[in-house]
Amino acid sequence: MNKEQLLKELNFKAVRSSGAGGQHVNKVSSKVELTFTIEDSLGLTDEEKELLLKNLGNRLSKDHILTLSSQESRSQHRNKELIIERFFNLIEQALVVPKVRKATKPKKAAIAKRLDAKKQHAEKKENRKKFRF
């Protein structure tokens, strides 16, 4: 993953933020929307693209475009910084390949120990029963 190349490929759009804000809110576009097309990226290898498409499938549009937005700050520049940081965190998490689970069997000693405990428990229960002639 080439971060510099990915930064060049990001598209930003500033729009008016929702919510309260007084007189200033209708004049300033402080909300930042980031769009990124995974398939057209030159900063990702083919394997990385496949991983992203698989792991971020529910966050992508039909055209495989990732869209993120930030309106946490009143500053457009701060929102842009936040959205870039969130974008790279999301990409790094999606590129992590989980370890392959190896199936294992319990050891013979563990099986014997479990069966002995079962027998002792059953014996204890059996001894509680009333004796009949």
Image (tube, rainbow, N blue to C red):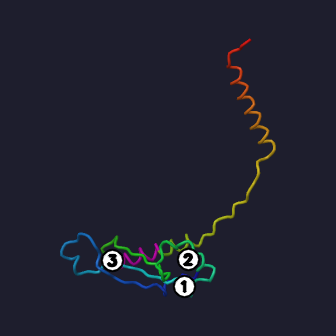
Residue drawn at the location 62% of the way across and 83% of the way down: 46
Q: Which residue is mark 3?
A: 31
Quarter where residue 98 is shown: bottom right
Q: Which residue is mark 1?
A: 39
User: CA–CA distance between discs 3 and 1?
Assistant: 26 Å
User: CA–CA distance between discs 2 and 1?
Assistant: 9 Å
> What is the magenta range?
77-86
Q: Tell me which numbered mark, 2 or 3, is placed earlier along the sequence.
A: 3
Q: Tell me which numbered mark, 3 or 1, is placed earlier along the sequence.
A: 3
Q: Nearer the viewer, mark 2 or mark 3?
A: 2
**Residues tagged 2 and 1 counted as in contact (Cβ below 8 A):** yes
x and y, in percent, of residue 101 in the image: 69, 60
Task: Check disc 2 and report its element: helix, strand or loop.
Answer: helix
Amino acid of disc 2: Leu
Residue 53 is tagged as 2
Front position in the image: 122 or 73: 122
Amino acid of disc 3: Lys
